[in-house]
Image (spheres, helix red, strand yellow):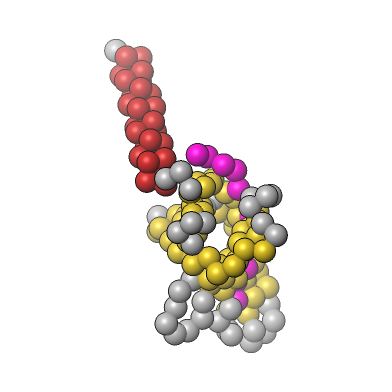
Amino acid sequence: MVNTCWKRTVFKNKLAALVLLIFCAHNAGAQSLVLSCTAKAVYGRVSDLSVEEREGHAPSIVVNVPSKFISYEYERDGRAFRFVYEIKDQIDGVLWAEEPSLSGPKNHLSFDLDSLSFSTSYLSGKFNTLKFGKCLKTI
């Protein structure tokens, strides 16, 4: 009986993953690139020039060049984070984007379409962050 329940659970998980994959492919559209990535972060404080490395995270990145946006999402400690960047320029296969902001510091992102590597920067004047990583195509 336990084996049958386990097989049903495995089947349900595979079915759920397939439905999610189809949903993502449909919503992402033909022009979107959906990526699974690994990243690290480095933080620096201007006040004492200290630098700290933060544990890695696994963001999902969606690149949509025709719509001029890049979405960067990840979860840490049960909290979800999502950043949406507007593509401002493309030079030699590298996308340069920034997070729209009416006031205050902005996040910036560079994404290399050839190597699928990226970096983001957040410069606030007090606490600055650099994230960097590499991606694999999922869809």
Question: Left or right: 29 with respect to 121?
Answer: left
Q: Is residue 64 above or below residue 1?
A: below
Q: Is residue 24 left or right of residue 90?
A: left
Residue 7 appears in the figure: yes
Highlighted range, magenta:
128-139
Name the spot of residue 50 as percent of width and height, x first.
Answer: 68, 77
Q: Quadrant of the N terminus?
A: top left
Name the main secondary structure of what is drawn in magenta.
strand
Q: Nearer the viewer, residue 83 or 111?
A: 111
Residue in the foreground of this view, choosing between 13 and 45:
13
Estimate the x, y position of residue 43 in percent, counting from the top left: 62, 71
Is residue 130 rendered magenta in the image?
A: yes
Tell me what residue is drawn at x 55 percent, y 81 percent.
124
Which residue: 40% across, 58% down?
80
Look at the picture and state if 3 lies above or below 106. above
Where on the picture, by quarter, is residue 46? bottom right
**Residue reaching furthest to the front:** 66
Q: Residue at x 69, y 49 (%)?
A: 115
Residue 119, visible in the rendered structure = no
Tell me the quarter of the picture where residue 44 sits.
bottom right
Tell me if 55 is positioned left or right of 16 in this view. right
Image: 26 above or below 47: above
Q: Nearer the viewer, residue 133 or 46?
A: 133
Question: How many numbered marks have been drawn onto this rendered protein structure?
Answer: 0
Q: In percent of the image, x 60 and y 43: which residue is there?
A: 136
Image coords of residue 8 (percent x, y): 32, 20
